[in-house]
Image (cartoon, rainbow, N blue to C red):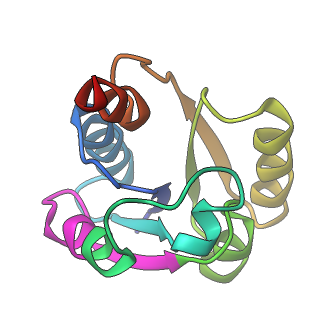
Amino acid sequence: MKIVYSYYILDIVHRGHLKMMENAKAIAGKDGKLIVGILTDEAVMEKKSKPILSFDERFDLANALKYVDLVVAQETYSPIPNIKKIKPDILMESTSHDEKVIEEAQEVMESIGGKVIVIPYFPSQSSSNIKNQIKK
C-alpha cells in the first residue's frame, strides 16, 4: 500500500486544491492512502497572515473531500516533522514552494526511502488571488 502525504492551509477551497488531491490520490493508487496535513493557525502564521476559517473548519473541509483518506494537523509550515512521523512513500510538493524547502524535503524523503513529486502551481488557482478579488 502506497501512502502519499500532501499539505494545505485550505482557507478557501478551490480547483487547484482539488486537482492536487485528485492527482495525489491517483498516485497513491486504488489501495493506497492519501494523508492530508492541514496547517494549524500558528503554522500558517510562520509565513502568512492568519487564516479566515478556523483550524477546525479547515480540518473538517479536508475530511469531507472524497480523495482524502486521513487528515492530520501540521503544526509547522514545513511538512518535515509530519513526514518524519508518518513516513509516506511520496510527498506532494508545489512549484510555489521555495526550491530550498523542496530540496530539504527531498533529502528527508530519500532518508526514509520515499520521494517527492513536485507539481505545477497555477497562479490562477490561488486562495490569495481569490481573497483579493473578493476585497475588490
- Which residue is nearer to you in this view: 134 or 122? 134
Q: Is residue 1 above or below residue 116?
A: below
Residue at image location 36% in from the left, 28% down from the top: 132
Residue at image location 49% in from the left, 57% down from the top: 7
Residue at image location 86% in from the left, 49% down from the top: 104
Q: Residue 54 at x, y = what percent?
A: 34, 74
The number of numbered badges drawn on the structure is 0
| Residue 96 figure quarter | top right
- Which residue is nearer to you in this view: 133 or 27? 133
Q: Residue 131 at x, y = what percent?
A: 33, 35
Is residue 54 left or right of 100 when viewed as pictured? left
User: If the image is split into quadrants, where does the C terminus sit?
Assistant: top left
- Which residue is nearer to you in this view: 135 or 6? 135
Is 67 included in the stretch rendered in magenta? yes
Q: Residue 44 at x, y = what percent?
A: 58, 61
Q: Is residue 44 above or below residue 97?
A: below
Q: Residue 109 at x, y = what percent?
A: 75, 57
| Residue 1 figure quarter | bottom left
Is 63 included in the stretch rendered in magenta? yes
Q: Is residue 2 above or below residue 82?
A: above
Is residue 14 left or right of 5 when viewed as pictured? left
The span shown in magenta is 60-73
| Residue 38 figure quarter | bottom left
